[in-house]
Amino acid sequence: MSDEAGSAESKKVQKLVLMGTAVATVLAIAGTLFYVSPQWYQNYAPTQPIPFSHKRHAGDFKIPCLYCHASAERAAHAEVPGLETCMNCHSVVKTDSPHIQKVKEHFDAKKPMEWVKVHVLPDFVRFNHKRHISAGVACQTCHGPVETMEKVYQWAGLNMGWCMDCHRNDNYVTDRRKEWAKKEIEMGGVAGASALPRMGGAEAAPLWYKALANKHPHNADVSCTTCHY
Ligand code: HEC
Ligand code: HEC
Ligand code: HEC
Ligand code: HEC
Ligand code: HEC
């Protein structure tokens, strides 16, 4: 092989490597967007460290969701309960079960149980439980019939279109908020801040306040920054 042929050959290799890199980058980006979207995890039901049954606890025994997930009502995140909540009952209930013994071991050692997260929105999405619970959206609207699930799974797609479909509707707009919106529209939307105390305080301020210009009250704001940082 002559030198010339060799360098032509290596140029060809370089070109191939470059092309390969470009293709790999595009695939990586597409793959990330694909992988990141929670809709591909619909029906996802990971195996948990112990088989905890929502059907048993929330269904058969009718323990309220908020007894274990109290933070859903108070914070952006709905935390999984600490083991002291389990021990309220399991210090006496079913102590002969190996699963309950595992709960007790972790509790005594102050070691949290390594529950595998079921629902995961990508980092660039902002979600807030408290706002939905206080607007009257039921857990089941987004999580499905959890009280019938032996093993909890991702029931909804959680994709952007799913969020938007509800935010654009008006089925969670209470009469008081509709009244408020009507007043706002009558006043041309200018006296909003001063009308707040009379209409029930800042708590009653609907997020669609900003969207009143189109005179159509909807469940929640649909502007990009509502859900994206
Ligand atoms: C006795 C306590 C208890 C009660 C009552 C309970 N849960 Fe749970 N929940 C848990 C525990 C523990 C986990 C974590 C283990 C698992 O995923 O199965 C969990 C997990 C979940 C998850 C999945 C969280 C994730 O990782 O994304 C959802 C959603 C959920 N619960 C909703 C509900 C709803 C809705 C109700 C009422 C119908 C309810 N839970 C009642 C204890 C409880
Ligand atoms: C309000 C009471 C109560 C709370 C709180 C509670 N449980 Fe239970 N749990 C029960 C009852 C009652 C049973 C059914 C016992 C039986 O089958 O005899 C049960 C059954 C179980 C079982 C099945 C045991 C077996 O081997 O059959 C597991 C596992 C379990 N619970 C885990 C948990 C965990 C984890 C928590 C905390 C996140 C928790 N429980 C919180 C009342 C409770
Ligand atoms: C408007 C829809 C919606 C409602 C209503 C809702 N959730 Fe969720 N829930 C979600 C989404 C979306 C996630 C994933 C959040 C994330 O990854 O940041 C989630 C996650 C969770 C988790 C895992 C912990 C976390 O915050 O990521 C638990 C537990 C949970 N929800 C319980 C509940 C309970 C209990 C209720 C009712 C009191 C409830 N949810 C109501 C949509 C909802
Ligand atoms: C079933 C109806 C429904 C679904 C589904 C839903 N939302 Fe909402 N969302 C609402 C309502 C109602 C409010 C409360 C509006 C208010 O308080 O004025 C709200 C409020 C919010 C807020 C609060 C805005 C703020 O400024 O605090 C955020 C953020 C939000 N939603 C994000 C999401 C995301 C992300 C999803 C999808 C993963 C989602 N929502 C799915 C009905 C829904
Ligand atoms: C009500 C909440 C909500 C609003 C409002 C919203 N998004 Fe999203 N968006 C989401 C959620 C949840 C995801 C992640 C789920 C998914 O990938 O489908 C997402 C994903 C995305 C992605 C990632 C690509 C994709 O589809 O996976 C882009 C880009 C995006 N949003 C842009 C926007 C823009 C631009 C706006 C304003 C016009 C907007 N979003 C408004 C909830 C929202």
Image (cartoon, rainbow, N blue to C red):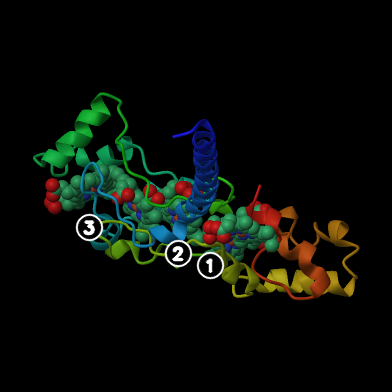
Q: How would you rate the neighbour count of disc 2 (Cα within 10 Å): few for under 14, some for 14-19, many for 20 or more?
A: some
- Please name the amino acid that badge 3 sits on: Arg
The alpha-carbon separation of the residues under discs 2 and 3 comes to 25 Å
Residue found at the very far front of the displayed protein = 2
Q: Mark yes or no: residue 208 visible.
A: yes
Q: Mark yes or no: residue 133 visible.
A: no
Q: Are the residues at dot 2 and dot 1 in contact (C-beta closer than 8 Å)?
A: yes
> In the image, which is nearer the foreground, mark 2 or mark 3?
2
Asked if disc 2 is less than 8 Å from ligand 5, the answer is: yes
Compare residues 15 and 124 and report the one nearer the observer.
15
Q: Secondary structure at mark 1?
A: helix
**As drawn, 137 above or below 113:** below
Residue at the disc numbered 2: 157
Residue at the disc numbered 3: 56
Asked if disc 1 is less than 8 Å from ligand 4, the answer is: yes
The alpha-carbon separation of the residues under discs 3 and 1 comes to 29 Å
Residue at 37% x, 51% y: name it: 118
**As drawn, 61 above or below 79:** below
* Residue 109 screen position, x and y as percent: 26, 23
Q: How would you rate the neighbour count of disc 1 (Cα within 10 Å): few for under 14, some for 14-19, many for 20 or more?
A: few
Residue found at the very far top of the displayed protein = 109
In the image, is 85 to the left or to the right of 37? left
- Please name the amino acid that badge 1 sits on: Trp
Residue at the disc numbered 1: 162
Residue at 59% x, 47% y: name it: 124
Image quadrant where residue 202 sits: bottom right
In the image, is 218 to the left or to the right of 126? right
